[in-house]
């Protein structure tokens, strides 16, 4: 079992920035993939960003972004702390939602919620115009 704890959500005005954090309780061979999803009530969770690192070479990192956030959001990790971050810049009202981090990747697309076994409780991001 892996526990994920997110933090950093807040209310900001359009154009502002936030940094979300996701701390994992322990490392496993299945959580060398971590992702951020967001969800608005009444919709499915949408993959926002993912990060993958090779277990044999943890410095070999691959990141992917949804088209809607590319160039504005950055996902990165602090290996020593076991924490993944999502730096969000130039926030827009459409970025509003509950943001969740996920790990325990089972395979397939990294932007599909069902591909992940472990989830955090979520942190709310609200962007006003």
Image (cartoon, rainbow, N blue to C red):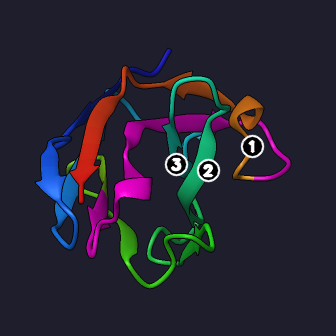
Looking at the rendered structure, the secondary structure element under dot 3 is: strand
Residue 103 or residue 113, whichever sits in front: 113
Are dots 1 and 2 in contact, CB under 8 Å? yes
- Is any atom of residue 24 visible in this view? no
Separation of disc 3 and disc 1 at Cα? 12 Å
Q: Residue furthest top?
A: 1
- The C terminus, quarter of image: bottom left
Q: Which residues are the magenta region?
A: 86-109
Tag on residue 112?
A: 1
Residue 15 horizontal/vertical position (percent): 21, 73
Mark 1: give few (<14), some (14-19) or many (20+) Cα within 10 Å: some
Residue at the image position 75 percent from the left and 36 percent from the top: 115
Rendering quarter of residue 80 = bottom left
Tag on residue 47?
A: 2
Rendering quarter of residue 126 = top left
Front tag of 3 and 1? 1
Classify residue 6 as left or right of residue 120. left
- Mark 2 or mark 3: whose residue is earlier in sequence: 3
Looking at the rendered structure, the secondary structure element under dot 2 is: strand
Q: Residue furthest bottom?
A: 71
Q: Which residue is mark 3?
A: 34
Classify residue 38 as left or right of residue 87. right
Residue 97 horizontal/vertical position (percent): 40, 39
Mark 3: give few (<14), some (14-19) or many (20+) Cα within 10 Å: many
- Mark 3 or mark 1: whose residue is earlier in sequence: 3
Residue 63 horizontal/vertical position (percent): 55, 72
Mark 2: give few (<14), some (14-19) or many (20+) Cα within 10 Å: many
């Amino acid at each position: 079992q892996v526990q994920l704890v997110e933090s950093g959500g807040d209310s900001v005005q359009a154009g502002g920035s936030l940094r979300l954090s996701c701390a994992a309780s322990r490392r496993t061979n299945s959580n060398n993939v971590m992702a951020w999803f967001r969800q608005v009530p009444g919709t499915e969770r949408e993959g926002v960003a993912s990060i993958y690192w090779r277990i044999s070479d943890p410095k070999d990192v691959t990141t992917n972004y949804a088209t809607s956030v590319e160039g504005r959001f950055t996902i990165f990790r602090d290996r020593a702390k076991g924490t993944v971050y999502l730096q969000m810049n130039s926030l827009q009202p459409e970025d509003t939602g509950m943001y969740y981090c996920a790990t325990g990747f089972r395979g397939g697309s990294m932007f599909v919620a069902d591909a992940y076994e472990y989830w955090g409780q979520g942190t709310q991001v609200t962007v006003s115009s």
